[in-house]
Image (cartoon, coloured by chain):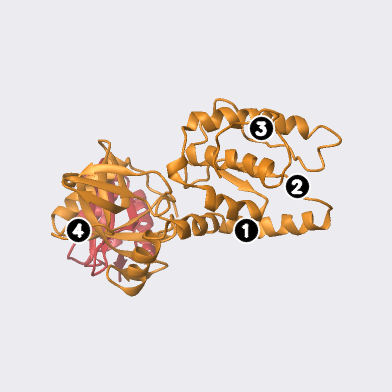
Chain colours: A orange, B red
Amino acid sequence: MESLIVPNEVFFSHILEEIEARRAVRIPVKGNSMLPFIRPLTDQVELSELTGQSVTKGNIVLARTNGSNYVVHRIEKVEGEVVTLRGDGNLSVRERCDKGNVVAEVTAVYKKGRKISKGSLEWNLARDCWFTSPLLRRFYLGISRNMKKIFFLFTVLAFLAACSGPKGMVKIEPPQEDSVEYELIVFDPGFETWYTLQNSPARYRSQEYYEGWNQQYVSEWNYLATQPRRRSFFESIIGYEPGVDYGFELNHKLFYYFQYVEHVLRIPILPNGPSGVIY
Amino acid sequence: MKIKENIRIKQIGDESILVSHDGENMNYTRVISLNKSAEFLIAGSFGADFTVQGWAERLTGRYGIDKTQAVADAQVLADKLMKAGAIYE
């Protein structure tokens, strides 16, 4: 089946006409920002006109942000006329808009033809258990986003287990068809658990900070991978290039992987690493 | 043949498409994109029986094309719509 491609602005302008005519619509979804509740490409959502209770914390809405950008995200809070949105699959990114830019409400999600309506048990569980558990969100998203790679990871780990000693392996995957984000894969299950506990927005620094250190770390790492005495641990990192915007989340995670290697595995990388990093 | 009652023609930007109403919502997850001649034929066929021959005559009348070609084009369109579940015998 081929896809019909129309600009978002044009598509949603038409969708809003349908909704204003009091017709609910069912549309496909793109992107990972509402994982794990709404999966891109396979799931679909029903959009309905707003009611007096639509703009309420926990509801999933279609909103216009930054002019002509449309998102289907969950309402995190409402303060006066300002609505803060966050996708279930987003750890730190939020959007803000006026109430007037919330244009429709998601009233059902279709998963392989099965309808999950707003107010159902599964819907309420997704809203209440997921949304109010940040630690669970971080851990589960790590599994959910990498489900396709888990088998591959297990295969690699089984191979590594047959070799002596731990290995420092990371892989940077370019964006897939349904995403604009690069993905970082770390072949060390111990890191994912450790990182879940370290990933605190309160301690975030700028993307530029993490990028600057990551470039130094990657350069030194790849040098160490050529050294006979060090290459038993260090596997070259391929795919992290200067000048490429890998995004905040990848840079943050990569930076903390280097901290994990240096301070948890106690394997030195940079002679003069960053100071003041809290874990 | 007839077009199913839940089928609608919609205009999204420059695109004409067929969408279906499944009883609960307008389903934009599976649409059929129409060119101008397909839109012309379908728009004039809602609520009434039609045949491939009838469509071919309308194409010939509007576009002045050869009848053999018109029948072939009309048959292709009817087959696609039948396969997509938009029309029935």
Residue A54, which numbered label? Answer: 4
**Residue B5: where, in percent of width, then height?**
21, 67
Q: Which residue is mark 2?
A: A167
Extreme residue toward the bottom, this view: A121
Q: Earlier in the sequence, mark 3 or mark 4?
A: 4
On the rendered structure, is A85 left or right of A262?
left
**Dot 1: what SS?**
helix
Amino acid beneath label 3: Val
- To the question of a shared chain for discs 2 and 3, the answer is yes
Q: Which image quarter: residue B15?
A: top left
Residue under the point 32% across and 46% down: B66
Q: Which residue is mark 1?
A: A150
Calculate the distance from the C-alpha at mark 2 to the C-alpha at mark 1.
Answer: 17 Å
Amino acid beneath label 2: Lys
- To the question of a shared chain for discs 4 and 1, the answer is yes
Q: Earlier in the sequence, mark 1 or mark 3?
A: 1
Chain where mark 1 sits: A
Q: Which residue is mark 3?
A: A218
**Dot 4: what SS?**
loop
Marks 4 and 1 in Cβ contact (< 8 Å): no
Calculate the distance from the C-alpha at mark 1 to the C-alpha at mark 3.
Answer: 24 Å
Amino acid beneath label 1: Ile
**Dot 3: what SS?**
helix
Nearer the observer, disc 2 or disc 4? 2
Q: Earlier in the sequence, mark 2 or mark 1?
A: 1
Residue under the point 65% across and 55% down: A189
**Dot 2: what SS?**
loop
Calculate the distance from the C-alpha at mark 3 to the C-alpha at mark 4.
Answer: 47 Å
**Residue A250: where, in percent of width, then height?**
53, 40
- To the question of a shared chain for discs 3 and 4, the answer is yes
